[in-house]
Image (spheres, rainbow, N blue to C red):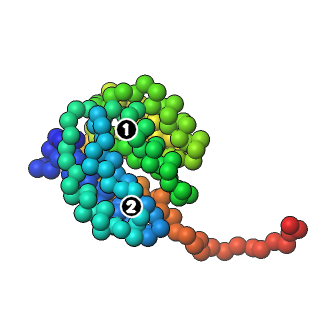
C-alpha cells in the first residue's frame, strides 16, 4: 500500500476513501478503520457517525506499515470490533494488493463464521495478481461484493459506492396495500 500512483500512495487513497465514508455516516452509524499489515496500527474507532470530524482527523495520522497483508490476522482483528458492535448492519471492507495477501489459510472459514453471525465482508483488490481469486472467494463467502481495480485512484469512489449501498434509508417511501390479518 506504500506504492505510489501519480504521486499518491495507495494507502493515502484508501484513507481518503475512509474519510469520505466518515463524512457520509448518519449520527447512529459507526466507523472503525484498522490499518493492518502484520499487525493492527493507528486504529480509528469505533466512533459513532456523530463524531465524523474526529474520525476524519484521526485518519490523517494513518501511516504506511511494512510488508504484505496478513489477511487472517486482519480479519480476526476486524471480527473483534464487529462482534462488539450492536448495530444491525456490520460490514468489513478489506483492501489489498492483488498479489500481496498472505496468510490465507483459515481466512475463508473465518469469513463463513462471520457471515453466520450477520457480519458481511467485501474485498477490494488493487491490480491483477495471484491473490485475486482468493479475494473474490472471500467476498462471495462473506456475502459482500468484490472489486478489482487497476488504478488505486479509484479507491475513494469504490469505498463511497460500497458504503452508499449499505447506508439504506431508515424510511422507505413506496406504495403498499394493507391487509387485514389475525395476530
28 sits left or right of 132 in the view: right
Q: Can residue 130 be spotted in the picture?
A: yes
Q: Secondary structure at mark 1?
A: helix
The one nearer the camera, 32 or 126, is 32
State whether residue 154 appears in this view.
no
Could you say where residue 103 lies in the image, as x and y percent from the top left? 36, 27
Depth check: 97 or 150 in front? 97
Q: State the count of labels.
A: 2
CA separation, marks 1 and 2?
Answer: 19 Å
In the picture, measured across the screen, residue 139 lies left or right of residue 152, that is right
* Secondary structure state at the residue bearing disc 2: strand
Of marks 1 and 2, which one's residue comes earlier in the chain?
2
**Residue 47, which numbered label?**
2
Rate crowding at label 1 as few (under 14), some (14 to 19) or many (20 or more) other CA atoms within 10 Å: many
Image coordinates of residue 175 in percent, x first then y, are: 66, 74
Residue 100 in picture, x, y percent from top left? 28, 31
Specify the farthest residue to the left.
Answer: 7
Report the residue at 31% width, 50% height from top: 43
Q: Quadrant of the N terminus?
A: top left
Neighbours of disc 2 within 10 Å: few (<14), some (14-19), many (20+) = some
- Residue under label 1: 74
Q: Residue at x 37, y 38 (%)?
A: 74
Amino acid at each position: 500500500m506504500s506504492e505510489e500512483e501519480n504521486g499518491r500512495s495507495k494507502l493515502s487513497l484508501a484513507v481518503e476513501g475512509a474519510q469520505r465514508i466518515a463524512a457520509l455516516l448518519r449520527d447512529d452509524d459507526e466507523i472503525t478503520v484498522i490499518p493492518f499489515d502484520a499487525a493492527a496500527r493507528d486504529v480509528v474507532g469505533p466512533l459513532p457517525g456523530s463524531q465524523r470530524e474526529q474520525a476524519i482527523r484521526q485518519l490523517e495520522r494513518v501511516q504506511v506499515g511494512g510488508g504484505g497483508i496478513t489477511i487472517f490476522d486482519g480479519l480476526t482483528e476486524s471480527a473483534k470490533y464487529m462482534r462488539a458492535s450492536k448495530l444491525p448492519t456490520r460490514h468489513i471492507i478489506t483492501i489489498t494488493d492483488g498479489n500481496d495477501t498472505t496468510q490465507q489459510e483459515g481466512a475463508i472459514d473465518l469469513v463463513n463464521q462471520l457471515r453466520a453471525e450477520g457480519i458481511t465482508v467485501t474485498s477490494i483488490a488493487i491490480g491483477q495478481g495471484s491473490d485475486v481469486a482468493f479475494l473474490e472467494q472471500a467476498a462471495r463467502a462473506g456475502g459482500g461484493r468484490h472489486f478489482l481495480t487497476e488504478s488505486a485512484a479509484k479507491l475513494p469512489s469504490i469505498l463511497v459506492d460500497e458504503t452508499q449501498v449499505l447506508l439504506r434509508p431508515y424510511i422507505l417511501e413506496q406504495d403498499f396495500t394493507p391487509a387485514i390479518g389475525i395476530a
